[in-house]
Image (cartoon, coloured by chain):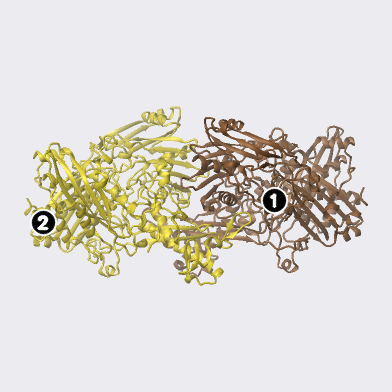
Chain colours: A brown, B yellow
Amino acid sequence: MYSIVGKNVARLDALEKVTGRAVYAIDLKLPRTLHGKVLRSPYAHARILRIDTSRAESLPGVKAVITRENTPERRDGVVILDQHILALHVVRYVGEPVAAVAAEAPEVAEEALDLIDVEYEELPAVFDAEEVMGPNPRAVIHPYRASYEQETPLGGRPIPFDPRHPNVFNHFEMHAGDVAKGFREADLVLENRFTKAKVQHCQMEPHTAIAQVDPDGRITVWTGRQGIHRTRGHLAAWLGIPPSQVRVISPYVGGGFGGKEVFAHEFLAVLLAQKTGRPVRISLTREEVFTGTVTDVQSTIWIKDGVRKDGTVVAREIKIILKGGAYADLIPMTVRGCTFAAVGSYRIPNLKIDSYGVYTNEPAAGPFRGVAVPHVVWAAESQMDILAEKLGMDPVEIRRRNLLCEGDKNAHGEIVHSTAARECLERVAQFIEWGERLQQGPGPWRRGKGIAVGNKHGLAPAACSAIVKVNDDGSIEVRHGADEIGQGANTVLAQIAAEEFRIPLENVKVTFGDTAFAPYDLGSTGSKTTYHTGNAVRLACQDAKCQMFELASGKLEVPVSELETSGGRIHLAGYPDTGIAIADLFVHDRARGKYLPEVGEILGKATWVQPGTPMDPITGQISPELASEGRRVNSFYIHGAQAAEVAVNEETGEVKVLRLASAFDMGQPINPKLCEGQMEGGAGMGIGGALYEELVLENGAALNPTLMDYRLPTTTEMPKQDDFDSFIEAAPHKDGPFGAKGLGEGPIAPTSAAIANAVYDAVGVRITDLPITREKVWRALKGETGRGLKNRPRLFWDREMSEGKDGSTKALGDKHE
Amino acid sequence: MYSIVGKNVARLDALEKVTGRAVYAIDLKLPRTLHGKVLRSPYAHARILRIDTSRAESLPGVKAVITRENTPERRDGVVILDQHILALHVVRYVGEPVAAVAAEAPEVAEEALDLIDVEYEELPAVFDAEEVMGPNPRAVIHPYRASYEQETPLGGRPIPFDPRHPNVFNHFEMHAGDVAKGFREADLVLENRFTKAKVQHCQMEPHTAIAQVDPDGRITVWTGRQGIHRTRGHLAAWLGIPPSQVRVISPYVGGGFGGKEVFAHEFLAVLLAQKTGRPVRISLTREEVFTGTVTDVQSTIWIKDGVRKDGTVVAREIKIILKGGAYADLIPMTVRGCTFAAVGSYRIPNLKIDSYGVYTNEPAAGPFRGVAVPHVVWAAESQMDILAEKLGMDPVEIRRRNLLCEGDKNAHGEIVHSTAARECLERVAQFIEWGERLQQGPGPWRRGKGIAVGNKHGLAPAACSAIVKVNDDGSIEVRHGADEIGQGANTVLAQIAAEEFRIPLENVKVTFGDTAFAPYDLGSTGSKTTYHTGNAVRLACQDAKCQMFELASGKLEVPVSELETSGGRIHLAGYPDTGIAIADLFVHDRARGKYLPEVGEILGKATWVQPGTPMDPITGQISPELASEGRRVNSFYIHGAQAAEVAVNEETGEVKVLRLASAFDMGQPINPKLCEGQMEGGAGMGIGGALYEELVLENGAALNPTLMDYRLPTTTEMPKQDDFDSFIEAAPHKDGPFGAKGLGEGPIAPTSAAIANAVYDAVGVRITDLPITREKVWRALKGETGRGLKNRPRLFWDREMSEGKDGSTKALGDKHE
């Protein structure tokens, strides 16, 4: 059916990347470049009394020093404008930028930082999520934030400053059915608390920005980014200049995962370049990447389920606290986004979700692959195994019983479309030989299996555009504004264009990463590129074809409606050998140029607008009318499942992942190998979060902000090749380009729960706080922290926040162990 | 009437250039770049017997050596495909590329050249124009050239190989009236022979090319060029790959003047980059610029005029020989182009022109500011003064009497449009105080005045395109494929776009010099950019406005036809404060992006096609029908005049230009200051050609190929500021953008004749071979070479070439001294 869609073509950048010739922002240096360094706060919370830069300024080789004194006072942010680029009166986390220096050499800039005298008055700081939710936290972090936060269709509701919980800034809630009634009718009500540590994206390429200011004031910034147009908008707004005066160039990006958003160093590089008239390069150290960009949120999740004896989940209540750190700009999107994980997988008639964003005096959190969906899936899919055990059911069977199917109505009131959740579940169960008993050896290692499902929603509303140029030799060029963050966006978009033109892939060139030429795109974020940008590319191709057909129609004396293109020719539909070559639309000039005699160029262009669908602000449901039109809150849901086999050392608590299978639906896969890559990468990142990763903070200061001390898993922590498999369960989406959806964030979602369930299966230890470290398992095995669920979960703030509501907390704890 | 057209706004690149931050190709280096050097022939004509590169290849640091053995055999060229990139069997001039080397450092590459052993067998060589025209020249340079030359509407007729004159390759002829009858009816027939030495463009920036080959085979070449799309076409055709695989980037160009066409070093850089997998940079030495790129043609011109007693020129016959050197690719355009100079200025009822291109064993000639029009004007305007003297007339008066006026029919049969030739003549006469006697001092210096008119035609047929993007802040971007060769193209095109949008100039950005984004353009050549590219920009603006109006029409509920734009708003025509801001056509996205909900981007695009008009192949005339429709052979004619006052030292022969005025029409000037710059630059270059410049060859080898030995005039050779003036005589052209024409080539045309006439006025010496060196004047003053016209001009080959025609040569020499 398709000529190139669905085929495992090699990545367009394969040769460049394997030969080391692909260019990343960190590779770039301009002539006469100065090197910038950032002085950062050593305190988690302090008032700045005085900054003296005179000694730094007089150091030979120092070209500029900037502080709050000579920096625009305008705050920056997307959803919450809570951040000054350089701290104004107060620093709110260890690592907050206070001053920046540009010098002839990095060492000189570094030395100059030591010569800047900053006098601080330390303030009390707050770090604990549960303390923060309460009325009298030790510190109030943003007391004057009334105007900070903007409503966004992708975020929860802003919470204005409230002295009862002054550090709570955002709340998203949804309801379906009657959760109190559901709990009353359940045979078993079970509540648990799950937490996940602060982790960081750990992209291989540290953040690097190079800014250059033209003599006419125009600014160019090279930076590895997700969302070049948004960066341009941020810089222009903050500098107070028209967006067209700013050009952002993002070459290949060495990993994004949500953590290549706009950060202070980009603004500071521009400011220093403006001050010095020379290009300024700021490349963050790994420590700065950990504490000066963003991390994932740290979460605390209470999940309470009511279930019938047959395994049907009849009611679920979830409370989520997400710590945004000291500056929480984009976190409202995570506050809302993570809740969809509870909607997308299961048929739960009575549902109540409350999700909160809170400030603490910790390094800022931001978007991270899955926007906390993995946190919710971690809680929910651990819970499903606990429920199954209580009911004496098979964990796969309890999931089967509750999974949403095509055509079902979900908790938003959406009609479910494009799901292969069940097929994914069966596929990984088959891989892991579910139901077959594992042979246990004589040593300390105990083996166990675990399984989990998960889903990730696709962004909506959103818009992206694309341009497709038809070249004078009949080849085409796709210009897009999404980012090549390693996921293979360029290859997928080229395949979509090649399919639309019916030409070989080598006749498609992709241009990206430069706001000067790439049309508007939100950027590679939220698993959106294949679906959203892909749709824009497809529409732009259709526009270009239309323009071609209009030019050809007269020459061929065939109406436009009867023309088709394939193999570089324009021909009567169905007759590929008739008609004319695309190249022959061009006049061949004597001087070896080819041109079009009228229209300048054939440039197809289009915007793909993915509408959102209004939800009831309290229930989170869409109207039945919109639902019956097939409208959805999100553009799509990625469904999938993972199954893991682990070995746990009873003596040391060490956990090894022996086997891991992923199965996901991504609509029609455009490039199956790239989909497998996403699944393997997601599972690998999932293993990190499940077993190893934690940015350890003490009084807000990171203790392990290096790749030596932060335990990022490597290939040796992954299952061996044959035991690490990925399966595609295509479920074409009616609105996707050739039926495609996104995929990237899905495969990280179920990993932690699958592994935790396998650990429990192996040694009967239920760890509820990620990561599942050796120490935690060992202590649990020793009985120190409880084997199973000895720790009574607390919904301590429930009365506080839910006061005056249904009082359903009476049911809490009654029926569970 | 106009808001920005006609205003002296500062050049867009002024700040960049005066601060030294503008980037030229020669400034560029890529990481890991190898340095290329070219081995060139020491013989003017020789057979290559053997090339041994083994010693060069084994030199440490050498990465590749290429010769005819590993270079495509395909020839390159535009009009005449006469050139192998590396000599195949024969070298035809001193400086012809024979081999090339890429090495880690330029010194290593240079050393490697010395280690390449080439065995030559020297062949007889031919250099003399008049010998070349004859039947038995010492050498036949391109015996197998049957398939070389292509017909072009811009060139003369290819002459196939003919043993009677084997090195003559191109001929253009035109006739008007009956020239024999004209001479019979004349009161005076006068014939003279004028020559002009070989000169070079001497652009400040030597030619530099950097080639990079992507792992997927795509090629990028940075090179300072006139005509990026043509370069792309050449490289692709020669390499046998699709044009879209080649990207040519030409940043600011440090001078073009016709001499930044495509040359061997660009191909060699690509080939070496392909071989080594690394970027290769070849930057020519000044000597290579002189002998390895192109020079101007060297000309010999016989001009014979028949004139009535009242000064009316009734007949003119011109024979022109242009030496193309060993490879004459583009010379057919010069062969034809130079003849228009005799058509455009005067009303001459009987005209006969024959123009020939010939090969010699000398460095190749190519396009040079004015395509030999200055040569013809030099001859014709010297001749006008000689005629005036014979008739006892005032030189200004004889010109007045013969000048073509608006509405006249010229020798092509075109209706003259847009001429201010008369106003220009009067203006410079006034400046120089024509008619007022100069006071002669007591010393050896004698002062004199001279005057000359001239014209240069504008290119046709031709096509160019432009793209205009409307930004989300209401500013616009112009993308064009012409070149910023220092002439101010970007500024002029921005003014045109700003006028069309009625916005300030700072709201227009210009993008150029990159085939990846610049639409097709012939390049900055033939004084075409303001008129041709300007028209394309204007049409593209109109297309963009139309797209904007369509988007606004619905919002405003006003039909498209009633909308206008100014000041960044779209409004009801005549009501600039109504309507909406252009920026508000864009949806403002929460994430600080702005996008268009449907059309991707507003991208206006257009091609300006300047049709040519068919001429009778023998008479060079267009049909009366086409003439009456206003059709023209050329797109426009630039008319102008120059007047000079010189001082000649009777003892040494030295000539000083004391005062020089230029006056030209360029239609409506877009930027008068830039027009004055063109006039001053042209006059300066004209002074060089008149008095100083000559590339001296001995047996085909250049004796003075350095800026130390080649006498390029500097500011000290120019008149002082107040004595060096430029005047604009606007004559708006109905088809030009806002009435503009071109200008660049015009102001070099009359300079030599004005100076020669002034020298004659001062000391009575008539020099007919440029440059008018001190030695020539001194010898003439001594009587060695004749004072006045003692040398009898020879139309020696006239009988040979004109055999069987009207036998009018009987009149030759009869009536003149």
Q: Which one is nearer the viewer's eye here, A505 or A544?
A: A544
Q: State whether residue A424 appears in this view.
A: yes
Compared to residue B463, the image places residue B66 above or below, namely: above
Identify which amino acid the numbered label 1 is placed on.
Answer: Arg
Displayed quadrant of residue A612: bottom right
- 2 vs 1, front mark: 1
What chain is tagged by disc 2?
A: B
Identify which amino acid the numbered label 2 is placed on.
Answer: Met
- In this picture, residue B3 sits left or right of residue A690: left
Q: Which mark is residue A145?
A: 1
> Residue at (78%, 58%) from the top-left corner?
A174
Callout count:
2
- In this picture, residue A810 sits left or right of residue B104: right
- In this picture, residue B746 sits left or right of residue B188: right
- Which residue was labeled with disc 2? B393
What chain is tagged by disc 1?
A: A
